[in-house]
Image (tube, rainbow, N blue to C red):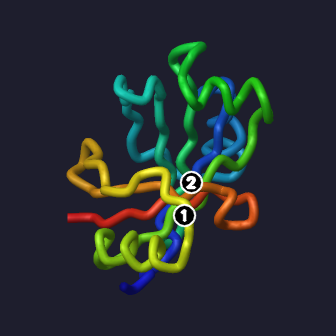
Amino acid sequence: MTIIKIDHIGIVVQDIDAALKIYRDALGLELTKTETVAEQAVKIAFLPIGESEIELVQPTSDNSGIARFLAKRGEGIHHICLKVDDIEATLAQMATQGLELINKTPRTGSGGQKYAFIHPKSAHGVLLELYEKP
């Protein structure tokens, strides 16, 4: 198991267009892609910064997990994503160390990347996402 880098930081926003006025227009970050993930009821905008990205996440449904997060906690950092070389081995090692896994087996994203989440209870209040890119 090797953690390679911070892949991205996920930030929940009420309105991606309004958030882009800060991240793209004021900070000068380039918007490289937006996508809607129907399965998770979110719209996502990607803004690279160095070797990592800022991922703006907007709910597209009032009853999604992201919408519940937004209603409870407001806008702000949602998760930190770590790029790993072998997600299955990383999950197995974390499980043996007693961490609570939200996803015991990885899911596959639109770009073919495998991802899984570690519960914030196990990471001092931080939702961690693991990524293995193809």
Distance between the alpha carbons at the discs numbered 1 and 2: 7 Å
Q: Nearer the viewer, residue 70 or 94?
A: 94
Identity, as a three-letter code, of the amino acid under mark 2 = Ile
Residue 48 appears in the picture as rendered: no
Residue at point 41%, 56% (across, down): 116
Q: Which residue is mark 1?
A: 49
Residue 28 in the image: above or below residue 17: below
Q: Is residue 50 left or right of residue 78?
A: left
Q: Which residue is mark 2?
A: 54
Residue 13 at what x, y percent from top left?
A: 67, 33
Residue at point 71%, 29% (across, down): 70
Q: Which mark is residue 115?
A: none
Residue 39 at what x, y percent from top left?
A: 35, 27
Identity, as a three-letter code, of the amino acid under mark 1 = Ile
Q: Which quadrant of the view contains residue 121?
A: bottom right
Question: CB atoms at circles 1 and 2 under 8 Å apart?
Answer: yes
Residue at point 37%, 30% (across, down): 37
Q: Nearer the viewer, residue 9 or 86?
A: 86
Q: Residues within 10 Å of mark 1 (few under 14, many from 20)?
A: few
Mark 1 or 2: the one toward you: 2
Residue at point 41%, 47% (across, down): 32
